[in-house]
Amino acid sequence: MRLLDALLTTMRTLRPPKIDLDEAERLLDGRARQSDLVRLLAAAAAPPRPHELADEPAMVAAFVRAHRESERTPGPETRRRRGWRRMATVKLVAGVTVLVASGTALAAETGMLPDSVQRQAHELFSALGVPPPHSGTDAKSGITGTGSKTPPAGSPTPKPTDPAALELCRKWEAADRGKALGADDAHALAAAAAATKQGIPAFCAKVLDDGATPAPGNTPPLPTPTQHGNGNGNGNGNGNGNGNGKTNGRIQPSPTQHR
Amino acid sequence: MDDNLADALAAAVSGDESGFAHLWRALHPPLLRYLRVVAGDAAEDVASETWLQAVRDLPGFAGDATAFRVWLFRIARNRGIDEQRRAGRRREDPADLSTLHHDRNMPDAATEAIERSGTDWALSVIAQLPRDQAEAVMLRVVAGLDVAQTAEVLGKRPGAVRVAAMRGLRRLAEHVEVQARSRRRGVVDPLRAEGV
């Protein structure tokens, strides 16, 4: 600025001799004698104008957002450690899912779930043999514990049956065969698969196969008898569906929850 | 000059938003001006992208304030050049550039040069230099980098940077005179493409 002020008093200078490297350095460092060129350089480096600072709020907001995210996403070391923890979590969740699903499956199949849950299961998977709720299920409320773990009733339930299952299975496929599936979806899917006494991979294979042409029937067949014969064995053993190998496969009615 | 920024940078790296704001206020105007010269009309967009990338990578940044300055201008440069490529524009040919510039500023470039702020005028003149010269001048004068740091941003040897800056200044010196003379005569001569 000192330079610029001084320059404003000096209107014109004679043509300077050709600039050499030393003179260039003086100019670039602001040490050169006054000239139009110095004035031009000073103008280029003048203090910021208001419009050049107008984006500050937006960029600070972006900074705050990014920082929050970076706190959620850990650095490489913690990420590795967290990988193990996630593995363990997946195993645990898969184990619980199997337990819950086997119970839910039997319960859904036999109409023993609490009404709201049973209705939801029915709406989602009636084509697969899940009946609507009875009017009175008071005597069978021993299942409530498992029922409470199904997706919250608040979440919108797709009306047509097969598209819902299809969508879940597509999500499941897209989520790296369930590894990254949300808890609610995972549970709903496990329950659906269990209702047909199939593992998720087999269940989804069938659903996705049928996907293009949705099954017409949306009135449920009578609950159990036709479903009993098929498939306790199939689709269970392949084990990689939940990414952990051991715990995800076998869906069978747990002995404590028979009718 | 970067001593003042050291605290702001440290604060920003640890997630402090006022530290980041300080950093941004100090570095955004020169960044924007540099990008005006490198990326033309896309300067604002490229500057935003640059800052967003900086914001993303800041938590892992380990260098000092000068290193940050170099890093920031490098990001801006790469993005600016990509943008230029995308836009399919070429800045290598000063004759084309000056034509473009004067077309854009017609009918009366001299009047407009006076009406516009001295800074905009200066940037538009520097933008007419061949790009390596324009960049060397801008990084030295506006971004506040020394020869070695400018060389780092440009990926060149310091000697090459010195020469490019010197040539740019020579050409500017001629150009400024042309401007001064033409202001007297009320005529704008196009920037002379030869010389140096």
Image: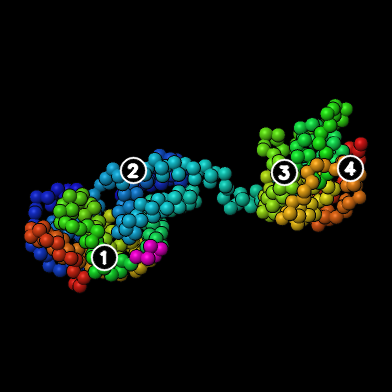
Q: Nearer the viewer, mark 3 or mark 1?
A: 3
Given the image, what chain letter belongs to the residue carrying mark 1? B
Q: Residue at x 22, y 57 (%)?
A: B105
Tags 3 and 2 on a common chain: yes
- For label 4, the residue is A224
Between marks 4 and 1, how big is the CA–CA gap? 80 Å
- For label 3, the residue is A160
**Please, what secondary structure does the residue beneath circle 4 have?**
loop
- Of mark 4 and mark 2, the one earlier in the sequence is 2
Q: Decide if residue B196 is in sight here.
A: no
C-beta proximity under 8 Å, tags 4 and 1: no
Instruction: Give amino acid for label 2.
Output: Ala
Tags 3 and 1 on a common chain: no
- Of mark 3 and mark 4, the one earlier in the sequence is 3
The span picked out in magenta is B85-89
Picture layout, residue A155 above or below residue A240: above
Between marks 2 and 1, how big is the CA–CA gap? 29 Å
Give the prevailing secondary structure in the magenta stretch.
helix
Between marks 3 and 4, how big is the CA–CA gap? 21 Å
Q: Residue A65 at what x, y percent from top left?
A: 49, 42
- For label 2, the residue is A54
Q: Residue B153 at what x, y percent from top left?
A: 37, 61
Instruction: Give amino acid for label 4.
Output: Thr
Q: Residue at x 79, y 52 (%)?
A: A203
Instruction: Give amino acid for label 3.
Output: Pro
Q: Is residue B65 magenta?
A: no
| Label 1 crowd bin: few (<14), some (14–19), many (20+), radius 10 Å | many
Q: Is residue A180 left or right of residue B74?
A: right
Mark linked to residue B97: 1
**Please, what secondary structure does the residue beneath circle 1 have?**
helix
